[in-house]
Each structure stands twice: as C-alpha cells, then as structure tokens.
Amino acid sequence: TINDELIRLRIETLKRLRPLLTLVPRDPVPPGNLAWHKPARLLSLDGTHEIPSSGSAHAANRGVDGKPSTFTQGSNEWPWTYEVDLLEPREVRRVKVTFLQDYFATDLRVQVSADRKTWQTVATASDLDGSPYASEFAPVKAQWVRVSALKPNGPHQKGVLMAITELEVYE
C-alpha cells in the first residue's frame, strides 16, 4: 500500500541520516584547553556561596564552551569569582582569560586548589584594559581554578562588571 511504502521510505531516510546525527567527540577549543566543557560555577568573591548569572544565556558553562560569541557573567555582586572543576588533578602552568568587550576585570586574582579547601594564588593583575589576560607560573597540581574580579567593585567604574567569554587552562 501507499502507507507502507511511505513508512519504508522514511525508515530508509532515517537510516541514511543516522551517521550524520551521531555526536562525535570534538577536541578542546582551543586545543589543549583543560577547562573546555568542564563544570563551572559563579561565586561570591570569597567563594562561600553561588551567585546567579546575569541571565540564562550567560550561565557558568558559557565561559568554557569554546565559543567566542558566548559569555558568562555573575550578578548581584560587583566583585565575583568564576570557578572551574577540571574533574581530576592536573599539572597546571598557564591560564588565559578572555573578557567580553567593555565588561572586564581591571584587577584580578587567579587561584588553584587540589582539594577545594586550600587555595594558592598563582597570579594577580591590576590596571587591566579588557584585553585577554594570560599568565604562566610554576607548575602546580590542581583540580579547581578560580578567577576573581577584585575590581570593578562598584558602579561607574572602568570595566563595568567582569564577563568572561572563555577561561583557558593549560598544562
């Protein structure tokens, strides 16, 4: 019948499309980025509590998705912290933070931890201008990485409110 023939054609079409619909694991963007697609959180400056994002389109995972068109941004607090869980301890020696144009930390701190209890400051910077910030440091074993915006710490300041388009972490 015609119905049987239509069903058969649909099944054949779906069989041909199946390979195209299978998700193929991709390499991190950029290559080697340990933070790519890892769990992330928006926290208060001291890291004691989670804070909301500035909107559902700016959730914590947007800062590690490898897409320069997306970003994450905390709200309700001027200085805030972005935390990424690398899921296992890794030798970390370099961090790069790319900010959304006109929304950036002017002063920041980068910390790492192996246990999420004891934090080691591996980099600090001040008077940033919104350009991507990168820092290399002595290798340290870490599972968690934090970037804290120390400033701006109030309204009407250069940088407005930190927004991260991408956090990159490398061995």
Image: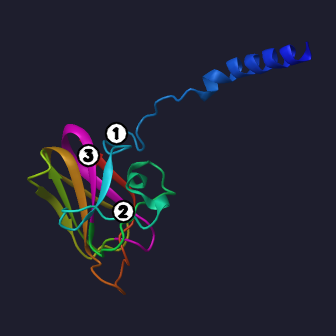
Mark 1 vs 2, N-terminal side? 1
> As drawn, is 132 to the left or to the right of 125?
right
Q: Which mark is on residue 132?
A: 2
Q: Is residue 132 shown above or below 158?
A: above
Residue drawn at x 35%, y 70% is 162
> As drawn, is 114 to the left or to the right of 71?
left
Residue type marked 2: Pro
Residue type marked 3: Asp
Instruction: Give the secondary structure at mark 1.
Output: loop
> As drawn, is 69 to the left or to the right of 28?
right
Callout 2 environment at 10 Å: few (<14), some (14 to 19), or many (20+)? Answer: some
Q: Which residues are magenta?
A: 81-104
Q: Looking at the rendering, which quadrant does residue 8 occupy?
A: top right
- The residue labelled by disc 1 is 32
Mark pair 1, 2: CA separation:
18 Å
Q: Looking at the rendering, which quadrant does residue 2 occupy?
A: top right
Mark 3 and mark 2 in contact (Cβ < 8 Å)? no
Q: Which mark is on residue 85?
A: 3
Residue 147 position in % (x across, y down): 25, 60
Q: Is residue 44 shown above or below 85?
A: below
Mark pair 2, 3: CA separation:
21 Å
Name the dominant secondary structure of the magenta segment. strand
Nearest the camera: 9 or 171?
Answer: 9
Q: Which mark is on residue 111?
A: none
Q: Is residue 101 shown above or below 39?
A: below
Residue type marked 1: Gly
Instruction: Give the secondary structure at mark 2.
Output: loop
Instruction: Give the secondary structure at mark 3.
Output: strand
43 magenta-colored: no
